[in-house]
Every structure is written in C-alpha cells, then in structure tokens.
Amino acid sequence: MLVLSRRVGERLVIGDDIVVTVIEVRSDGVRIGIDAPRHVRVHRAEVLDALTAANVDAVAADDRTAAALRRLVSPAPAQPDASGTPPTDR
C-alpha cells in the first residue's frame, strides 16, 4: 500500500487516465474527487461489501425455499377427469 500526504487541491495520478484530487479536509474526513474513464468501476468499499453480503444472503436457500421452487418448476401430476380416466397427450 502506498501512503501519501496530500493537501487540498493536490492530485494523485493512477496509470494514464485516473486522477484523484483532494477536494476538502475536515476534522471528520477527507473529500476526494476521482476522474476516471467510464469503463473503470469506482466503488466505495463499504457499499460493495454490503452489496456482496446481500447477494450471498439472497442466494442462500433453506429447505423450504428449495421445495417451493421445485413445486413451481415441476409439472403437476395429471389429474383424472370426472369419469376417472387420466388425461391423454394429444
């Protein structure tokens, strides 16, 4: 990890096309601006971590959820008609 001291208005260049600028320094934090091409994804780590955790929770299925999904995708067994004759495929 590279650790730098920067003052308001000073910049840091990453690669050829990413510029990080110190916008404001406060007692409770630092505001920075990031100028990067659209194809470069820039995320706050805590938001990305929360999203990842939510996605993991969303796909964790218990036995009841799995059974409900199986019922939704499995065809229902054929029911006999009023005469007691099971339906036929035509």
Image (cartoon, grey):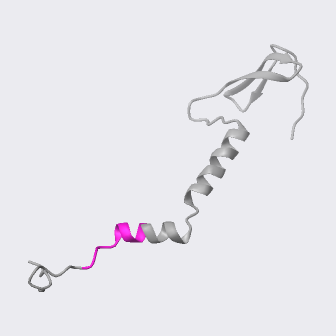
**The one of 44 and 77 positioned closer to us in this rendering:** 77
**Magenta segment includes 68:** no
Locate residue 6 relative to residue 86 in the image: left or right.
right
x, y (%) of residue 36?
64, 28
Give left or right: position of 37 versus 47.
left
User: Residue 31, relative to residue 3: is it above or below?
Assistant: above
Name the foreground residue: 67 vs 35: 67
- Residue found 82% across the figure and 22% down from its top: 30
Residue drawn at x 38%, y 70% is: 71
Can residue 71 be found in the magenta stretch? Answer: yes
The image shows residue 53 at horizontal and vertical percentages of 66, 51
Q: Give residue 79's quadrant in the image.
A: bottom left
**Image quadrant in which the C terminus is located:** bottom left
Q: Which residues are magenta?
A: 69-77
Which quadrant of the structure image shows residue 56? bottom right
Residue 70 versus residue 20 in the image, above or below: below
Question: Toward the viewer: 79 or 49?
Answer: 79
Asked whether 71 or 35 is in front, the reply is 71
Name the residue furthest top. Answer: 9
Q: Position of residue 42 (x, y in %)?
A: 65, 34
What count of labels does the image hold? 0
Q: Is residue 76 left or right of residue 90?
A: right
Q: Is residue 63 above or below residue 18?
A: below
Residue 11 in the image: x percent, y percent?
A: 79, 20
Residue occupying the point 87% across, 16% down: 7
Residue 48 appears left or right of 5:
left
Q: Quadrant of the N terminus?
A: top right
Q: In the image as oriented, which residue stretches furthest toward the bottom?
A: 85
Relative to 34, is 88 above or below? below
